[in-house]
Amino acid sequence: MDTQSKQIVFEQLQALLHDRVVDNETTRNEHGVGFSYHACTPPDWVVYPSSAEEISEIVKICAANQIPIIPFGAGTSVEGHILAVNGGVCIDLRLMNQILEINHADMYATIQPGVTRNQLDEALQGTGFFFPIGPGVNATLGGMASTRASGTNAVRYGTMKENVLSLKVVLPDGKLIKTGSKAKKSSAGYDLTHLFVGAEGTLGVITELTLKLHSYPQAIYAAVCSFPTVEAAVNTTIQTIQKGIPIAKIELLDEQMMRAINRYSSLNYAETPTLFLEFHGSQAELEEQVEQVETIAKSFGAKEFIWEKDEAARTKLWRARTDAAPASVAYRKDGQLMSTDVCVPISRLAKCITETQLDIEETGIYAPILGHVGDGNFHLTIVIDSNNPEEFEKAKALNKRLVKRALEMEGTCTGEHGIGIGKLSYMTLEHGEAVSTMWTIKKALDPLNIMNPGKLLPVLD
Ligand SMILES: Cc1cc2nc3c(=O)[nH]c(=O)nc-3n(C[C@H](O)[C@H](O)[C@H](O)COP(=O)(O)OP(=O)(O)OC[C@H]3O[C@@H](n4cnc5c(N)ncnc54)[C@H](O)[C@@H]3O)c2cc1C
């Protein structure tokens, strides 16, 4: 875009938003990288709308001038989702952070997209309800819906896919639509809600969400248990799931990850593969579940179980798990995080993780493993020396082999992080001809290709 046209767009945005249009370098750079390992690619402007109507007007200005739009929540996505690869307008949704309704009778909350998960947690305190989906950082609910995020509770409560009832969305032509309803289920037409959940901002801007709430459990127990091998820990997970024990969290940390968290948080856990577990239910249900899981774990050679029942001790126990990503980064001086995840059918999980561990060892890259293993989902928290191009290439090749392994096991190239630009090249490998069907949908809704262009869908020949 030439300088004169840019000036015209800037003036149109300013007339609408006044000082809520920012073009200084610091703000642009802050919005150009997220938590990804990709180089910063800033937008031309960052705008801060305060209503769906303003978003609609911004989108109309961009559509008239064929300017890319990048919706922005908290910028915690890891695959380069919010990079402005073709410049354009970054729509930062932080001012749209109102909790509009908490409905006790029908157990839902209606919120604006910039509400963060911590903010929602706080608003639900004392209501007897909670919203179970939470990545390991304070992401926004709009961003979480757009990446179809999950996290530690997904094994019991599902992902954003299962927990969004209804959305309001500004489409790429500026039209505002509502999808879904407040009813628990519906057979009325195409399921547009779930077209936008996971669309990574490529089909529209979410301006409102209605989310399912869950009753806060009567009792919660947490536990840590160490195993002689990764296989033993994963087989314990598989049997727990196959027996239908409704565990709320079951998280694997491998030897390297345990070493990193011990050092980071001055703890002294055994530095062997370890499961962090959590159980939700009534006291009687929990006693039964705990006994069943202990029996399974011991049959696979589990060593000691550490149980925590009161809230402060549970929070301390989970703190170690939550700090896993910063602990891995801190383990290597000047290290840069290159996080990646895959997901496989649970029966293949042990094979997938043990082959990956062997690959990591042979490659000589620092890559502790962390898994939401109850779903068959695990992450490599690769930490590389960003000034060493050879190491970067080795890490990329390791990631590629990981994805190939997961796909060969009929899994997916990402269980929860999404595609962004980091996993674009695997879309055709995973979906084949279905990628052109995705393009058909994209072109129908966004013929000018202005909504977060260059993300999620690879260019086809
Ligand atoms: C330490 C760490 C731990 C993490 N752990 C997890 C985890 O356990 N599980 C997990 O799933 N993820 C995890 N993540 C990844 C990340 O937190 C999620 O992808 C999260 O959903 C991103 O939310 P956000 O608000 O930061 O969105 P952003 O990063 O701002 O945006 C993400 C994508 O959504 C689009 N978008 C944002 N808001 C809207 C909107 N209102 N309308 C339309 N599109 C929109 C953006 O354009 C972009 O494509 C982790 C990240 C880090 C750094």
Image (cartoon, grey):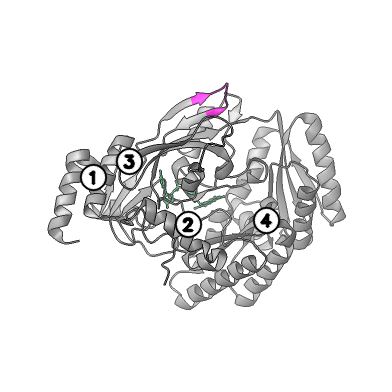
Q: Tag 3 or tag 4, which sits nearer the N-term?
A: 3
How far apart marks 4 and 3 lie (CA) works out to 39 Å
Q: Which stretch appears magenta?
A: 102-108
Gap between marks 2 and 1, in whole Å? 26 Å
Q: Is mark 4 within 8 Å of ligand 1?
A: no
Kindly tell me whether mark 2's CB lies below 8 Å from ligand 1: yes
| Residue named by callout 1 | 21
Which label lies toward us, 2 or 4? 4
Q: Secondary structure at mark 1?
A: strand
Q: Where is residue 226? Give x, y as percent.
A: 76, 54
SS at mark 3?
loop
Is 9 above or below relative to 105? below
- Residue 87 lies in what quarter of the image? bottom left
Q: Given the image, on which type of amino acid does mark 3 rest?
A: Lys
Q: Which residue is mark 3?
A: 175
Frontmost residue, 375 versus 333: 375
Nearer-N-terminus badge (3/1): 1
Q: Is residue 31 above or below residue 313?
A: below
Q: Nearer the viewer, mark 4 or mark 1?
A: 4
Tag 3 near tag 1, CB within 8 Å = no
Can residue 420 be seen here?
A: no
Residue under numbered circle 2: 78
Frontmost residue, 75 versus 9: 9
Residue drawn at x 58%, y 55% is 415
In x, y percent, where is residue 360? Answer: 63, 71
